[in-house]
Image (spheres, rainbow, N blue to C red):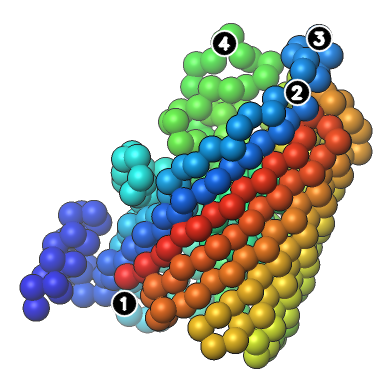
Amino acid sequence: MKKSALALAVAAGLVGFGSAAYADTTLYGSARVSVDYVDESIDRDLGDFVSGIFDGDGILDVTNNASRLGVRGEEDLGGGLSAVYQYEFGVDVTEGGNLNSNRPKWVGLKGGFGSLTLGTQWTPYYNVIGIGDTFNSTRAFGQYTFLGNAFGLRQDNSVVYRTPNFSGFSLEAMLVMNGACNDAANAVVPTCKTDASNKLPGNLSDDIDMWNIGASYKNGPFFVGATYLSLEGPMVNPATRPPTWDSEQWGVALGYNAGPFAVTLAYEDGDVNTVYPDDSKNLYLTGQYTFGPNIIRAAYGHLDPDSNELGVDKIDNFLVGYQYNFSKRTRVWVEYIGRTSDGAYGDGNAVSIGTRHDF
């Protein structure tokens, strides 16, 4: 009884709704911490900018891997209509900075028409390409394995509509409207943000800053998805700094998950990323085998820019991992993430040994 009362009190403090809404509110969280060894060898020969090779010693770091705390729930409004909401906060269990980040925080309605929600939300882009986000370490599905890492994860100031599920088929659309802010010094290349956690500049556009659609079909063990994302800002010199603010990107993903085996394949193409200054392609393949409480994972990623401006070149990523499940809520893992590149990004290696508990 005491534990239930405490959970209800915390949920009430986070949500801030009237007592009538508490009946369907769930408090949840996930603590994810690892000890990481990271060794980087980066070619910084960028002509007139910087030259030389950075080959630092390997470092050890206790790392937070997107731990979070949140509440979610819904209220039956009658006639098949429900109010739905989620407030989720990043919790850094290693260095502080708690109850922040742009993790999902939204409210809306759902019914026979589907759902309409407003706030900070997962993008349709991630809901398709993110099928390959299977490793535990946040280093795995990140800057060098996912072109949508900067703008295709979550977006604040967003409106999302999701259709009902039609025999496995569903459609999702997102509009991002980020307001405006004073940024006269950076009028050509917008950088001003209305809030430190915003993903897009506040002066990117006077109306819609980004839009994104995604379609998926899931039938038994099979998954097929496609997505398209567009930034609606001014066109600037792509060599200035990635990304170009008037840009687009698309992707497709396939998945199969049956019995002990799971395989995913994702492909991205476009210039909505911060890895390369121009149009780029990414191929990401994952495999997984489960036996008892054990899971073995492997993945291969290949990023290839259409040009090598600023000294960048193609990047190959190699990932392997082992996970042991003590229960449905508690696990430990050992994962290796490797990167090779002949260009400015150079080679990198990381080993992550961690634990995760969900509640």
**Residue 76's disc number:** 1
Q: Nearer the viewer, residue 331 or 21?
A: 331
Relative placement, left or right, of 57 versus 284 is left
Q: Position of 290 compared to 227: left or right?
A: left
- Give the residue number, with chain letter if any, for mark 2: 53
* Residue 181 appears in the picture as rendered: yes
Which is closer to the viewer, label 4 or label 1?
4
Q: Which mark is residue 48?
A: 3
Q: Tell me what residue is drawn at x 15 percent, y 74 percent.
A: 4
Q: Quadrant of the N terminus?
A: bottom left
Which dot, 4 or 2, sits closer to the camera? Answer: 2
Disc 4 secondary structure class: helix
Q: Amino acid at mark 1?
A: Asp
In the image, which disc is placed on residue 184? 4
* Badge 4 amino acid: Ala
Lower position in the chain sequence, tag 4 or tag 1: 1
Q: Earlier in the sequence, mark 4 or mark 3?
A: 3
Residue 220, by quadrant, is bottom right
Q: CA distance from mark 4 to mark 2?
A: 36 Å
Q: CA distance from mark 3 to mark 1?
A: 62 Å
